[in-house]
């Protein structure tokens, strides 16, 4: 140390090398967990069933599929419509939570996450109970059927809301009060301030949220499969090719087509990156909203409406889990919670899920946050950093089925030294981290970007190694975001189905898969019961985070107070 | 004194538990991939482990499409020792990729000729037949004044316009089963004409093979085209549903057994394959299915027509499997582009 102190140049290069090493490590993990498996699968897009190279003929064949153009158009317009509905809604909600003085913020913050806390089958069942052909509120559809684009968009809005809201809350939660003071002194009106200060500061979050929602809708096949009826979209084409026809070559072709949104996302991210500047400088004064009825009352109304919709849908499903047989025998029973009689894995499936999700939350958060920091503070412009940044955006655009299949083909290959992972819980953990990498990465990046790089410069000029600055400054400041990321990983891994359905073994069947199995077997009440149990676990974890949130904030966020 | 009692108890416990543990270790754990119904897994496992004490069954169960996709994706390094209870169409697909171990289980020659592999040694053996059938919701029918159909031809009745749901044959093996059955029973041209007429009455084509029946049971649809096994669980839960096996020829599929080439427990797998064609196993299948592979075994399942077997079309599985791609392409070109929402 003293030796290094004598030669400052050496410290810098040593440190730069360490940062570079860390980034290389992260790159290696992403390589093994994402790039190579996906590459193994996507190569098949250029092969025939026997494995010989056929160039673009699979693409040519796919292009002649009768319903292709319609499926592509349907995917695009449902995704665009969902984005246009969700992002403003989520922005309003996030704005209310961070920039207003509405009461019960903690409650709304918890309710906001409800849709991701439960498997997607839960809202789908609830929508059928409410708006299906036997539904209680079906008259509200004026004779239209829920099975089709209406069902898809409604279910997607519900499902995507928390993803967008999470990103926007992070984007809006830190603001420099001096900007607002300056604007007020310059006699700017509330709307002017909103347009010239708030929106530009949240630009990066808005772009991220839009990209995330759009891509989620385009790649999700669960909702169109259950409630989309026969409305063709690209994601169900993947399902048809992989599960219906076992045609992996064609599945890979559609998978490649679905990667296009990821490319757009990468471009958008680069664009937002160029626009950014340090949003919270080291001299920033945290913005504390003052009560103002004209702003707070409408925002409160919005929050209440959203909360009623979210809680209502989940409550209907909860009620469905207690019904003997919907809609013909509405007597209530707890028998549906006796999982052992419906599924061989029974309650043990829940324990599997908890273990996988906890491991994914701990390992995933450490990996993702550190990587995001290395990207932002190491050598952001280097080729390696660009590569990692690009790879981090890819998982969002990879449909779960494609990722699961890629994992089998790569990890089960006889000559893969990582083959020992196959069939274990570890591969389910790795799959979970990779599958949900993008949103966690974006959350981490959003949090880190709001810190002034000056923190690091000060640290560097004080000859504090960057790692120490990371540990003592960056991590504590970002602790709320880090906890958000960990909980996000936990709940998503608890509820995901599409990728793990290919990867679980005889002893590692997760609860979310058991939900699908019970629904397929016609036991929809039992499926709802298992989904509600999953929801209870994820909600407890979220509540625990909220309960300790105060402590965390007092311990780490005190500097934000004046 | 106390200590002595404790030691004695511990010893006694050890003596009783250790052999059990040792026995457990001697048992070979077979990984068995299956698409059987959930409720069948426990009785099947119990029966097999009682008949072949040297094995222990570890199930991996999923829907036919998922299990087949997994097996084929794992081809280079198979994780399953056996398949017990999977569509014969999937097994023929695997046979074509040289994934099945040739082995003729003891007594397999006694099975009905159409219910076993035509190779020697055999690559697969059949268990039972499941047929394409109509799930008919009697409550909805009463509300909407729908007559009860008894044949496929009845489904063309204009009264059923927008009431019928069936699985998309490209997404679901169950859907393909129905299409193959119509082709087999009516011949090519008549069958495609039939489907064109039926298309007018179809409300939607689902991606899941079980949804048509599950949702018909909940009154979401008036009737769904699915397979016969499906309705039993639903009726037990109190669904007002009737399962109709049409009189004018139904397509059928076999549940079958096969050993994976490259299994690490070949001997144990062969013992289980032997059990799977034995009379006790067939009687077990007969508790759930109306027609089992071994002639002379009387199925105990209820509510099937007496002349059930005569309603099955004569079907060459290998021929149908070979034509699958062509059939699906034809189906897609006729109905997929039109399958835009009409609701």
Image: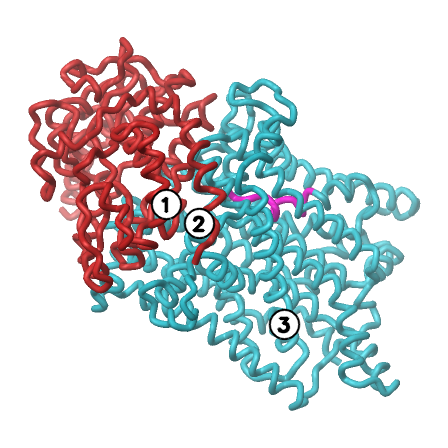
A482 up-or-down from A93: above or below: above
Q: In the displayed structure, does residue B236 sit left or right of residue A382?
A: left
The Cα–Cα distance between marks 1 and 3, rounded to whole angstroms, is 47 Å
A20 up-or-down from A467: above or below: above
Provide the residue designation for mark 1. Answer: B199
User: Which chain's residue wears label 1?
Assistant: B
Provide the residue designation for mark 3. Answer: A94
Q: How is the image coloured?
A: by chain
Asked if badges 1 and 3 are on one and the same chain, I answer no
The image position of residue A48, as x and y in percent, is: 55, 22
Seen at 58% across and 39% down, the residue is A255
Foreground mark, 1 or 2?
1
The Cα–Cα distance between marks 1 and 2, rounded to whole angstroms, is 13 Å
- Give the quadrant of residue A553: bottom right
Residue at disc 1, secondary structure: helix
Q: Nearer the viewer, residue A122 or A451?
A: A122
Q: In the displayed structure, does residue B253 sit left or right of residue A413?
A: left
The chain shown in cyan is which? A
Looking at the image, can residue A485 be seen? yes
Magenta span of residues: A391-400
- Give the quadrant of residue B221: bottom left
């Amino acid at each position: 140390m003293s030796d290094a102190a004598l030669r400052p140049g050496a410290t810098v290069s040593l440190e730069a090398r360490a940062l570079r090493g860390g980034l290389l490590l992260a790159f290696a993990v992403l390589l093994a967990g994402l790039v190579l498996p996906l590459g193994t699968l996507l190569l098949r897009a250029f092969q025939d069933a026997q494995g010989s190279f056929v160039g673009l003929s699979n693409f040519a064949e796919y292009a002649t599929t009768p319903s292709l153009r319609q499926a592509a158009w349907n995917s695009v317009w449902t995704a665009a419509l969902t984005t246009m509905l969700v992002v403003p809604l989520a922005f309003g909600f996030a704005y209310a939570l961070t920039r207003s003085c509405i009461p019960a913020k903690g409650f709304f913050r918890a309710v906001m996450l409800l849709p991701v806390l439960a498997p997607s089958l839960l809202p789908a069942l609830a929508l059928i109970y409410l708006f299906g052909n036997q539904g209680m509120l079906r008259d509200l559809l004026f004779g239209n059927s829920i099975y089709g684009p209406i069902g898809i968009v409604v279910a997607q809005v519900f499902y995507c809301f928390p993803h967008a809201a999470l990103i926007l809350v992070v984007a809006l939660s830190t603001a420099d009060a001096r900007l607002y003071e300056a604007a007020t002194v310059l006699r700017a009106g509330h709307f002017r301030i909103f347009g010239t200060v708030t929106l530009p500061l949240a630009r990066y979050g808005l772009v991220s949220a839009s990209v995330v929602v759009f891509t989620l809708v385009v790649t999700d096949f669960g909702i169109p499969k259950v409630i989309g009826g026969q409305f063709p979209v690209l994601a169900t084409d993947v399902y048809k090719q992989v599960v219906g026809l076992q045609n992996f070559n064609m599945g890979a072709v559609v998978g490649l087509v679905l990667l296009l949104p990821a490319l757009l996302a990468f471009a958008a991210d680069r664009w937002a990156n160029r626009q950014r500047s340090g949003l919270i400088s080291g001299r920033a004064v945290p913005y504390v909203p003052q009560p103002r009825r004209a702003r707070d009352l409408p925002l409160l109304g919005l929050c209440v409406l959203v909360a009623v919709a979210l809680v209502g849908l989940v409550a209907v499903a909860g009620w469905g889990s207690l019904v003997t047989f919907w809609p013909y025998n509405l007597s209530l029973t707890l028998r549906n919670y006796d999982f052992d009689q419906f599924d061989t894995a029974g309650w043990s499936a829940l324990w599997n899920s908890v273990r996988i999700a906890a491991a994914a939350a701990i390992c995933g958060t450490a990996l993702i946050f550190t990587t995001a920091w290395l990207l932002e503070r190491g050598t952001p412009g280097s080729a390696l950093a660009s590569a990692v940044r690009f790879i981090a955006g890819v998982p969002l655009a990879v449909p779960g089925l494609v990722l699961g299949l890629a994992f089998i083909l790569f990890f089960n290959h006889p000559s893969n030294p990582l083959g020992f992972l196959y069939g274990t819980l570890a591969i389910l953990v790795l799959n979970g981290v990779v599958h949900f990498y993008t949103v966690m990465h974006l959350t981490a990046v959003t949090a880190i970007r709001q810190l002034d790089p000056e923190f690091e410069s000060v640290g560097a000029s004080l000859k504090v190694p960057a790692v120490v600055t990371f540990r003592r400054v960056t991590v504590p400041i970002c602790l709320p975001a880090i906890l958000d990321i960990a909980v996000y990983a936990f709940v998503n891994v608890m509820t995901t189905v599409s990728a793990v359905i290919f990867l679980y073994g005889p002893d590692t069947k997760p609860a979310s898969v058991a939900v699908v199995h019970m629904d397929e077997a016609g036991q929809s009440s039992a499926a709802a019961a298992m989904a509600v149990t999953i929801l209870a676990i994820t909600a407890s974890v979220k509540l625990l985070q909220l309960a300790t949130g105060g402590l965390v904030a007092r311990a780490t966020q005190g500097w934000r107070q004046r | 004194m106390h200590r002595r009692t404790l030691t004695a108890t511990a010893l006694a416990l050890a003596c009783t538990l250790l052999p059990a543990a040792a026995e457990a270790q001697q048992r070979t754990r077979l990984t068995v991939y299956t698409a059987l119904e959930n409720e069948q897994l426990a009785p099947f496992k119990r029966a097999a482990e009682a008949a072949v004490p040297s094995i222990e069954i570890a199930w991996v169960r999923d829907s036919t499409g998922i299990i087949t996709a997994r097996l084929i994706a794992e081809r280079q390094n198979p994780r399953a020792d056996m398949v017990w209870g999977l569509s014969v169409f999937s097994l023929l697909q695997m046979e074509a990729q040289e994934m099945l171990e040739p082995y003729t289980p003891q007594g397999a020659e006694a099975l009905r000729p159409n219910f076993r592999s035509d190779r020697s040694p055999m690559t697969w053996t059949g268990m039972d037949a499941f047929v394409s059938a109509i799930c008919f919701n009697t409550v909805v029918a009463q509300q909407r004044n729908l007559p009860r159909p008894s044949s496929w031809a009845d489904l063309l009745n204009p009264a059923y316009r927008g009431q019928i749901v069936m699985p998309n044959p490209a997404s679901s093996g169950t859907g393909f089963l129905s299409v193959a059955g119509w082709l087999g029973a009516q011949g090519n041209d008549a069958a495609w004409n039939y489907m064109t007429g039926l298309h007018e009455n179809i409300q939607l084509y689902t991606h899941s093979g079980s949804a048509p029946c599950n949702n018909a049971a909940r009154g979401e649809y008036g009737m769904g085209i699915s397979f016969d096994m499906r309705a039993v669980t639903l009726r037990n839960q109190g669904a007002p549903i009737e399962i109709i096996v049409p009189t004018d020829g139904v397509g059928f599929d076999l549940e079958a057994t096969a050993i994976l080439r490259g299994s690490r427990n070949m001997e144990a797998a062969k013992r289980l394959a032997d059990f799977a064609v034995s009379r006790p196993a067939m009687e077990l299948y007969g508790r759930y299915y109306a027609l089992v592979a071994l002639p002379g075994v009387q199925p105990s399942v209820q509510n099937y027509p007496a002349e059930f077997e005569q309603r099955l079309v004569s079907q060459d599985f290998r021929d149908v499997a070979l034509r699958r791609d062509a059939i699906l392409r034809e189906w897609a070109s006729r109905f997929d582009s039109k399958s835009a929402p009409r609701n």
